[in-house]
Image: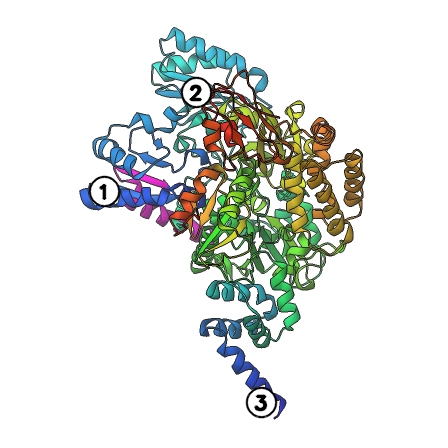
Amino acid sequence: MMVSELMKVEDDKARASLPEAIVRYIESVRSCEHGESYLIAVLHKVQEHFGYLDMRQMSAVSQLMQIPSAKVTGVASFYHFFTFVPRGKHKLAICLGTACFVKGAGQVLDKIKELLRVDVGHTTKDQLFSLDVARCVGACALAPVLIVDEKVYANVKPDDVARILEEYGFAAKK
Amino acid sequence: MATPMEQLLERRRNAKFHLFRDKFSADVRITVGSATCENAAGSEAVRRRFQELLDQHKPKHVVIGNVGCSGKCDMEPVVLIVRPGELPVKYVHMTPERVDEVFAEHVLNGRQVEKYTMRHEAGMPAADRVISVCEGAHCRAQSSEIQKAFRESLAAAGLAEKVVVTPSACQGLCAAGPVAYVYPDDVMYQHVTPEVAARIVNEHLVGDRPCSDHIWQESRVTNRFAPLYSDVYFFGKQLRITLRNCGVIDPESLDEYLAVRGYEAAVTAMTTMTPMDVINAITKSGLRGRGGGGFPTGVKWNFAASQASDTKYIICNADEGDPGAFMDRSTIEGDPHTIVEGMILAGYAIGAKRGFVYIRAEYSLAIKRIEKAIEDARAAGFLGKGIFGTACDFDIEIRLGAGAFVCGEETALIHSIEGERGQPRPRPPYPAVIGLWGKPTVINNVETMANLPAILLDGPEWFASIGTARSKGTKVFALAGKVKNTGLVEVPMGTTLRQVVFDVGGGILNGKRFKAVQTGGPAGGCMPESALDTPVDYDSLMAAGSIMGSGGMIVIDEDSCMVDMARYFLDFTQDESCGKCTPCREGTKRMLEILNRITSGRGVEGDVEKLLRLGDTIKKTSLCGLGQAAPNPVLSTINHFRAEYDAHIREKRCQAGVCTALLSYTIDPEKCVGCGACAKKCPVNCIKGQPKSVYVIDGVRCIRCGNCFKACKFNAVQRK
């Protein structure tokens, strides 16, 4: 096979692993000046679509943007916003900004870890919850703040955690 | 062909016409706060309920609109109701149920629901009028005399119950000072003396004839909305330049921004000033970068402007990463066009045709609002080719951050926009010389940008008259933590920390004791009570061992452990260290290990000295600002709270009761009444005893959760 044919095979494979809208976006930015600078924007779109980044999608981005996959992985792993672990059905984020911390968010986090037996950045075995630490969400007056999916719970105390999780299908093991 | 300024004024006339027709002529205007924090507090449900009621009752001439955050965070959601000829009323802590009541009483029948108003909530006396007397640096000497004269004249006129006299912060009208403002009449008096005060009471308040010879007649873009803030007690202690439109105009409406002299500064600059004139004006104003470093903005621009390159860039840094800071988010959510206009001005000054807003991906509402502002400005011909009908091109693009604190550092931010890992590089060359894609680049923070239009409209001399000798203008702080009034406050430079925490912030929550105030986020320091009279300006804070930073201000009370605080900040910076240079990458790790050891009860003699030595080395040898500042929280807490470190290490005791590993719980047999409440709450069943006899905690099995401590009503459970 010619190099150009090989490229086409690889390109087609890459196209197949990404949604069409993202493929189109990559093609549109590649023609811009400094096209490679849109790598982070592309990764945002991929994560928004899949909920996380895996090797297959990152290789596809690397192929379509013609950026070495070492760099794609390097950039993706550098920034906190990107995750390589599939997220749970519900995404928990406990804010550990200074205001939340001063008002006891650490104890709330401990309680969540204890109840769900899951560490920060991971997903429960039943895939129901994933746990993250949010940086300040700017709702400092409501501290401590727990965010479940899009909903914000204000002034959360460790004793409230079980009740909040139950709203999302958590059943405490007796 | 109309000139750019004529075109802009025509647009403004149209905007005002539309606004008046659709909004301001209404009998009742309802505005609901709409910002990330407001929404989190439930403002969307409040707005929906109003809409349902409006659809149901279809009252004539009632309009509802959104505004950004007014900064009164602890009272959100906030609703403002304006009826012509009446005081604007702000309702706080609104819920759909309260909306029903307010709608039935106030909107339909014109009767205020007193118990939900901000004034009532703040515990302020009901009054028909408020007179606020400036207490800023220029007016301070005469202020108390004037206030006294007002009070005496009011008492003599029998108005003592009806008019409240209150001090206010510098109002930025120093040349006209001392000034006094009569609310809600919206009259500002200048050159007030005790004699003039007596005249104001007799002629204006009693006789309804304002003393015209002392009325301040000029117009400023700042402080025009004093009546609409509707809470002189909270807002009167502030001076709003950056936040001049936040919480007042609809952030998604270009018309409303135009109506408040929006884009006038940009058009004036581009048609009547050379780029050098603009740079000189900003230099003269004394504006310093609000992102934390405090570098003079005009000087930075001058570096970039003097580079011979046909391509230059402007970057607005909105990657607000400090935990506990939300000034930039609120500014963008409340007044996004100001940022667009600021960037146009900066672009014109240095000769850049492209600008970037680098913003945190987590700030979804702020992103949406700045995107809309950019689109609207582009559609109006304010961005793109030949903006405002001049020969200049300028356009703005948004780039999302992805969660890296180090990107607050200029060279790291530039790498991130280039699509690389956000790691810093040594400076010089500075970005103003070699920046984005190797071209001269100026990076300014959101707050810096927001100041620019106000400086050009109200004049650099005016701006330079506010603040201290070397720090001009105001600073916005995100006041949070254990303080009564949390929220965004904008105060003149030189205001003391004590004034911010106790006057504006209202003091400590729940009657607890003040311990420290933390400024500058993870790069700053904790200042104890003895440093409370430090004025807020770049140099004084630096001298006191902290930094101005971007504006997070967290109040800490006796319930927080300072060693744990230091550990918290170091945990953050250690996690955020980009790993490029060794002192920061390894040094912060080692410091964190020592702090973890101390807070878990394994600290040894000499640990504090090790922290001091390591901290000093990291500060001196790190490549960028992140590493150079990372030890600050540790060093400042050792400096001011050494006794807490020593207690942790020598006595294995945490005074604040935060470091659980150091706590032990026992039951005082003298006080125990044998009720058994503690044993019921114990999750590990380590409390044994019989009802009516003394209970005992098994210290070995105890997990130190503190449940028994909270459960005991007789203070018999002791925590040490």
Left/right placement of residue B51 relative to residue B530 reads left
Of residue B541 and residue B442, the one placed in the foreground of this image is B541
Residue B332 percent across, percent down from the top left: 49, 47
Q: Which residues are magenta?
A: B3-32
Mark pair 2, 1: CA separation: 37 Å
Residue at the extreme top of the image, as rendered: B156
Q: Quadrant of the N terminus of chain B?
A: bottom left
Magenta highlight on residue B18: yes
Q: Earlier in the sequence, mark 2 or mark 1?
A: 1
* Label 2 close to label 1 by CB (< 8 Å): no
Which residue position holds label 1? B53
Specify whether disc 2 shares its chain with disc 1: yes
Disc 1 is placed on an element classified as: helix
Of residue B241 and residue B44, the one placed in the foreground of this image is B44
Mark pair 2, 3: CA separation: 81 Å
Left/right placement of residue A36 relative to residue B235 reads right
Bin the neighbour count of mark 3 within 10 Å (Cα to Cα): few under 14, some 14-19, many 20 and up.
Answer: few
Q: Residue at x 77, y 38 (%)?
A: B611
Residue B179 percent across, percent down from the top left: 50, 22
Which residue position holds label 2? B131
Residue at the extreme bottom of the image, as rendered: A1
Q: How many marks?
A: 3
Q: Amino acid at mark 3?
A: Glu
Of residue B226 and residue B570, the one placed in the foreground of this image is B570
Front: mark 2 or 3: 3
Bin the neighbour count of mark 1 within 10 Å (Cα to Cα): few under 14, some 14-19, many 20 and up.
Answer: some
Q: Which mark is residue A5?
A: 3
Q: Quadrant of the C terminus of chain B?
A: top right
Specify whether disc 2 shares its chain with disc 3: no
Q: Amino acid at mark 2?
A: Ile
Position of residue B186 relative to residue B329, above or below, is: above
Q: Which mark is residue B133?
A: none
